[in-house]
Amino acid sequence: MVNLTHHSYFNLAGKGDILGHIVTIPADNITPVDAGLIPLGNLQPVAGTPFDFRKPMAIGLHINETNSNEQLRLGPGYDHNWVINKTMGELSEMARVYESTSGRVMEVWSTEPALQFYTGNFLDGTITGKGGWVYPQHARFAWSRSITRIPRTSRSSPPPN
């Protein structure tokens, strides 16, 4: 099995951080991770947590709640797999991002069941991008769709049933 992914980074404003970007992800669960950011193999409800993007929410609203949310502390930030509320194989919207100063909107559509959302947690200002912009932490975000609802917990483990 091969799961190829294209890992482009986005900032709909073109510069600055992504903390004010408004995100919607129609998912009731994420797959929690361990200290190495490897999925644990179970589901965790998003209701009442900083991971609840079922209604539009700014990326930065809860991202710094690392003292009260272990999953954000491990990130540090969002680097998790959301299990999308949908029928397997159905083409549907997996995520929507809106940035108010540019008015830009990005939608992610797929037939896959899950979506990895990463908020540039390990960007540290050592990368210079287009136009000479330096990329500090949370300057960009990335999406990648996942072909399984619960990603494999190690490189050698079999996929879950």
Image (spheres, grey):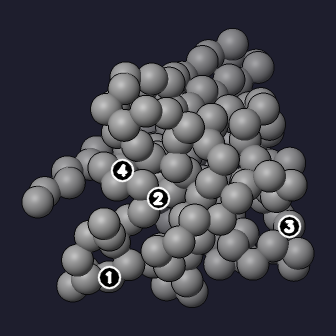
* Mark 3 residue type: Glu
Residue at screen point 72% across, 36% down: 54
Whether residue 128 is situated above or below residue 55 in the rendered picture: below
Asked which quadrant contains residue 138, the reply is bottom right
Residue 65: mark: 3
Residue found at the far left of this picture: 1
Along the polypeptide, which appears first: circle 4 or circle 1? 4
* Residue 62 seen anywhere in this rendered image of the structure: no
Q: Is residue 1 left or right of residue 146?
A: left
Residue 76: mark: none
Q: Nearer the viewer, residue 70 or 85?
A: 85
* Mark 4 residue type: Ser
| On-image quarter of the N terminus | bottom left
Along the polypeptide, which appears first: circle 3 or circle 4? 3
Where is residue 26? Give x, y as percent.
62, 35
Residue 154: mark: 1
